Amino acid sequence: MSGADWIAALNERVDLVSVLWLFPIVFVFHDFEEILTVEQWLAHRGERVLAKMPAFARRLLADTFRMNTRLFAQDVLWIYSFIVAAAAAAVFFGVYLPFLVMLAVFFLHVFTHAAQALLLRMYTPGVATAGLLVLPYSLYAYYRLLASGTISWDEIALSLILLVLLLPPALWLLLQGRRAAVRRSIKRADRAAGC
């Protein structure tokens, strides 16, 4: 079976609504890999990775490298909530722009995982499912949305513009939230050790 035949068969079996709802499912499987590996990976490799970073990046990401599984999972829950809301807006109301912005982040996230693994020359949490699940899903979702006429290239361009505008403040909020969460966690641990 050729690639075109395989895609045609897939298109017959999977309707567009299913493609949209697959986004939160693929995200969860990708983030399971990260959630299950990040704390141990940071414990074994975090200091070495931080040492390779420029000083500004070390200061910016220091709290990220002190996160435990619970704190990381809380971040994932927030992102997952946005993805579910974006999928629901697309499915129930035909509003695709939030979905396209989140899909663009998801798609580009593949390349951050690949770059991290290549630059560090090691496994990094999430790199396996980024290549095996996120990349194929993202490409297929874009293909289906474009092929069905549901979206246009102009809408993809607009989603990328919005991504460029929204990503810096979103990352700043994420890092501030991580900083606060790590500090609260340290204070709780200190209080528990003092009891």
Image (cartoon, rainbow, N blue to C red):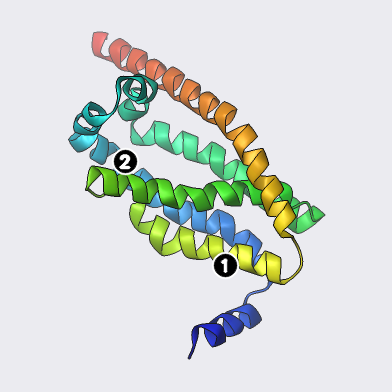
- Mark linked to residue 38: 2
Q: Secondary structure at mark 2?
A: helix
Judging by the rendered image, the residue that carries numbered circle 1 is: 140
- Mark linked to residue 96: none
Q: Residue furthest right?
A: 93
Image: 21 above or below 62: below
Q: Residue furthest top?
A: 194
At 74% from the left and 50% from the top, the residue drawn is 89
At 29% from the left and 37% from the top, the residue drawn is 39
> Looking at the picture, how far across and down is residue 135, in whole percent?
47, 60
In this picture, residue 168 sits left or right of residue 35: right
In this picture, residue 96 sits left or right of residue 31: right
What amino acid is found at the position of numbered circle 1 in the picture?
Tyr
Circle nearer the N terminus (1, 2): 2
At 44% from the left and 56% from the top, the residue drawn is 29
At 50% from the left and 49% from the top, the residue drawn is 108
Nearest the camera: 37 or 144?
Answer: 144
Q: Report crowding for label 1: few under 14, some 14 to 19, many 20 or more residues within 10 A (C-alpha).
A: some
Q: In this rendering, which labeled residue sits more in front, label 1 or label 2?
A: 1
> Looking at the picture, how far across and down is residue 71, in whole percent?
41, 31
